[in-house]
Amino acid sequence: MDLDHLVNTIGEWLRGSGPESDIVMSSRIRLARNLAQFPFLSRADDATRGEIATVLKKGVTQLSKGLGAPLNYLNVDDLEGLDRQFLVERQLISRELSDSHGSRGVGFSDQERVSLMVNEEDHLRIQVLRSGFDLDSCWEEISHIDDLLQEQMNFAFNEEWGYLTACPTNVGTGIRVSVMLHLPALVLTKEIQKVFQALQKISLAVRGLYGEGSQAMGDFYQISNQVTLGKSEDQLLKNLKDVVPNIIAYERKVRNAMIKENRRSLHDQVSRAYGILKTAQTISSEETMHLLSSVRMGVNVGLIDDLQIPAVNELFLQTQPAHLQKLRKATLESAERNVSRAAYLRQKLAGHGGVSEN
Amino acid sequence: MKCYRCSKHATLHITEIIKSVPHELHLCEDCAQQYLKNPDSQSEEGAFKPSGTSGDKPLDELDKLLCPTCGMSFREFRNQGRLGCAHCYLAFQEELYPLLENIHGETRHCGKTPKRAPIASQKQTDLIRLRNELKQAVAAESYEQAARLRDQIQTVEAELQAEASQAT
Ligand SMILES: [Zn+2]
Ligand SMILES: [Zn+2]
């Protein structure tokens, strides 16, 4: 399959169509599974890795029929670095799978909602991604996929410890439930720290989203469960379903307060961010993320009225290094990418009148 | 309490939460801001090292503690944080309990189970063991033994497949 045709599209989960998608970028669930008849990957030589990949590739093909939706399968070991990075940016594969070695692969649906990673840390990592705050749909879909796969294969399972995984931190349900939140107002007012403190107490993990290098990116934070053993999938989902609405409400409250009390300075910040993105001649990935974050909030609070959220989401993705290079059909060094990124942004944002005057 | 990075007064107490045994961090506001923006671990799952378990046992004892199915020693597991096969959970049961308790606060699964009973789990364990023996035979250039093991693997696989097709 040719990846190039994906360059001008975005995955369904980025379209901003799901519930609360002004603040919740996406909901994601992944399941870790291992085939019962093979050793885990730390004890698998190249030949065994190859056998595992063959079994699971066949499994993905069968699954495709069961789902009635085509799944594209790629041998990740055949892909060049740029293509692997491209898949990482789209969240179809993890950085770990990209950087690993030997036989490995990924199967994913056309809408990019479903992806199945083969020979990552476990033999199989199933992932479902959806726009907005929609964990129930994610669970329904991923559990169905898991059931269909289990009609064809046996996963390592034990009554006492549940699904057995390479790392004991994933054993039991093998589930990671996560929600990606855009929290610019909480970051701006430093209220975010209170959120972090509250979340730790109920053993939820928070991570920033990373772009090029190790800079935090665009005020996006991912919240997920840490515990996988001793609680049911429903309980683990419920944990997030209970907490996330409070964070959303908090972010909204702070945004409203800022509009009420500091409208001018917020308007100024948003307008400057938009202005730079429309006119810069060279711009780094970090600065782009940072400014797009302000613009995204500006759109959501009505300070920018000629731009839609899906368009902003698309810019977050398309200005990433591998996407830029695929768009330009060239390998670009960092400095060249910055020039190319600025040109891309100017072109995409041209014709947008600007910041609203109210 | 002092901030562990700059020794100003620590106002934030963060439990290191990236796939690790809980680990307290005490930070001042500036360093916490920095930390939250840019935690040390960049990978989503973080690096997991099961530190502190069985710490009282001498190392050579941990070396001798082997999974009979895949040949991994408990010491190897401690070093890389990844188990060698499903059977390791049984082989290292005693050592894993405190670790699981530490990570999850529980030690018993409660959640989704396979719809049908897993068939012939002994055969699956045999396959993992045979594959490990094959790996060693190849490494030792014992090609006759390797050929014999390949045949055995094929036989067991065929038996498993036959049982699976009967079951459905
Ligand atoms: Zn400090
Ligand atoms: Zn083992």
Image (cartoon, rainbow, N blue to C red):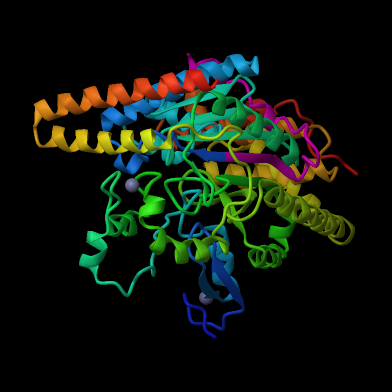
Residue A235 sits inside the magenta stretch: no
Question: Residue A8 versus residue A27: which sits nearer the camera?
Answer: A27
Position in image of residue A338 (x %, y %): 50, 36
Residue at 51 percent across and 49 percent down: it is: A170
Q: On the image, which quarter does residue B163 sit in?
A: top left
Q: In the displayed structure, would residue B97 be above or below residue A31? A: below
Residue A8 sits inside the magenta stretch: yes
Residue at 26 percent across and 47 percent down: it is: B71
> Where, quadrant-wise, is the C terminus of chain B in this rendering?
top right
Position in image of residue A239 (x %, y %): 72, 54
Question: Residue B29 versus residue B136: which sits nearer the camera?
Answer: B136
Report whether residue A77 is seen: no
Position in image of residue B159 (x %, y %): 37, 22
Q: On the image, which quarter does residue A80 sit in?
A: top left
Q: In the displayed structure, would residue A303 be above or below residue B61? A: above
Report whether residue A339 is seen: yes
Q: Which residues are magenta?
A: A1-30
Question: Residue A306 versus residue A193: which sits nearer the camera?
Answer: A193
Q: In the displayed structure, would residue A67 be above or below residue A224? A: above
Which residue is outermost to the bottom?
B1
Residue at 63 percent across and 40 percent down: it is: A29
How many numbered discs, if any? 0
**Image check: B111 left or right of B76?**
right
**Image check: A235 left or right of B44?**
right
> Where, quadrant-wise, is the N terminus of chain B in this rendering?
bottom right
Residue at 67 percent across and 62 percent down: it is: A199
Position in image of residue A352 (x %, y %): 76, 29
